[in-house]
Amino acid sequence: MGPDGSRAAASEGFVTRRIETGCGAVLVRTGGVGPAVLLLHGFPQTGLTWRDVAPLLARASTVVVADLPGYGGSDPPADTDDHAAMSKRATAATLVAAMRRLGHARFAIVGHRRGAHTVDQTGSNGRATRQSGCRPTSFPDD
């Protein structure tokens, strides 16, 4: 088990920690050296979704794998009547705050499913250097 109670800390050479953002703590796993890239998971996963990809990227990048706010080891945002704290825009702002706390003012960002929608909000606000999102797709059950 990893220090956050999850399966092994995702990958060898990655450090798991919680980053305070002002909107709750975000659990991140960091590893590698080079330009920063933030990896965001989809619903209903956690950052462990990236456990096979992250070590490959860490060969040439500083990889930050985050649990989205309210998922896995990250704190949920405070609830409001309009639920705006769970919007993709608010989620993006929280993750940008976590990246800045880690010392990354500029970074690439990649998302899958819910993470891809968060990527859209992060990039549209000019907060990321490059962005990529995998759009949600449904496949029939076999």
Image (spheres, rainbow, N blue to C red):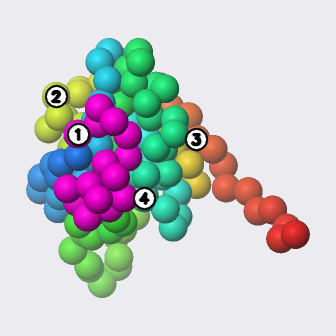
The reply, left or right, for residue 132 in relation to residue 59 is right
Q: Which residue was labeled with disc 4?
A: 46
**Placement of 15 over or under 91, stated as above or below:** above
Q: Nearer the viewer, mark 3 or mark 1?
A: 1
**Placement of 88 over or under 32, stated as above or below:** below
Q: Nearer the viewer, mark 2 or mark 1?
A: 1
Disc 4 to disc 3, C-alpha distance: 16 Å
Across and down, in percent, residue 110 comes to 49, 37
Q: Nearer the viewer, mark 4 or mark 3?
A: 4
Q: Nearer the viewer, mark 4 or mark 2?
A: 4
Q: Is residue 121 magenta?
A: no
Disc 2 to disc 1, C-alpha distance: 15 Å
Q: Earlier in the sequence, mark 4 or mark 1?
A: 1
Q: Which mark is residue 15?
A: 1
Residues at badges 4 and 2 in contact (C-beta under 8 Å)? no
Quarter in which the N terminus is drawn: bottom left
Q: Which residue was labeled with disc 3?
A: 133
Quarter of the rendering containing residue 104: top left
- Local secondary structure at mark 3: strand
**Stretch in magenta:** 1-15
The reply, left or right, for residue 43 in relation to residue 14 is right
Give amino acid for label 4: Thr
Q: In this view of the protein, can residue 98 be seen by the observer? A: yes
- Local secondary structure at mark 2: loop
Q: In this view of the protein, can residue 68 be seen by the observer? A: no
Quarter of the rendering containing residue 30: top left
Residue sitting nearer the eye, 90 or 64: 64
Quarter of the rendering containing residue 11: top left
Q: Which mark is residue 103?
A: 2
